[in-house]
């Protein structure tokens, strides 16, 4: 408990706020960077899923229904 009180006295009004930055000259906090990585990772997986669905459609579903022929 003593450490938390000392930290609160040291930081003052900034106590409990995310003020840690990636680099001093970059105005992005670590939590914002983690959120960005989370969003871009999710977007990448969605893109991979769309690409696989398109490949399956082009390679198997379309020819099975006679929509087009696959040329070898």
Image: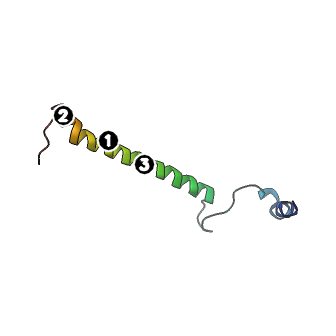
| Sequence-earlier tag: 1 or 2 | 1
- In the image, is residue 13 above or below residue 25? above
| Quarter location, residue 60 | top left
Q: Where is residue 56 in the image (x, y as percent from the top left)?
A: 27, 41
Q: Is 35 or 49 nearer to us in this picture? A: 49
Q: Is residue 50 visible?
A: yes
Disc 1, SS: helix
Q: Position of residue 16 (x, y in %)?
A: 76, 55
For marks 1 and 2, give the CA distance. 15 Å
Identify the residue at image location x=67%, y=62%.
Answer: 20
| Sequence-earlier tag: 3 or 2 | 3
Q: Is 41 or 30 nearer to us in this picture? A: 41
| Sequence-earlier tag: 3 or 1 | 3
Contact between labelled residues 1 and 3, with CB atoms less than 8 Å apart: no
| Residue occupied by mark 2 | 64
Disc 3, SS: helix
- In the image, is residue 53 above or below residue 1? above
| Residue occupied by mark 3 | 45
Q: Is 35 or 61 nearer to us in this picture? A: 61
| Residue occupied by mark 1 | 53
| Quarter location, residue 71 | top left
Point out the residue furthest to the bottom here: 24
Contact between labelled residues 2 and 1, with CB atoms less than 8 Å apart: no
């Amino acid at each position: 408990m003593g450490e938390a009180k000392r930290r609160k006295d040291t930081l003052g009004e900034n106590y409990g706020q995310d003020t840690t930055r990636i680099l001093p000259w970059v105005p992005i906090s670590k939590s914002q960077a983690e959120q960005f990585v989370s969003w871009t990772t999710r977007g990448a997986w969605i893109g991979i899923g769309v690409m696989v669905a398109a490949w399956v459609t082009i390679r198997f579903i379309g020819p099975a229904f006679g929509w087009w022929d696959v040329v070898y």
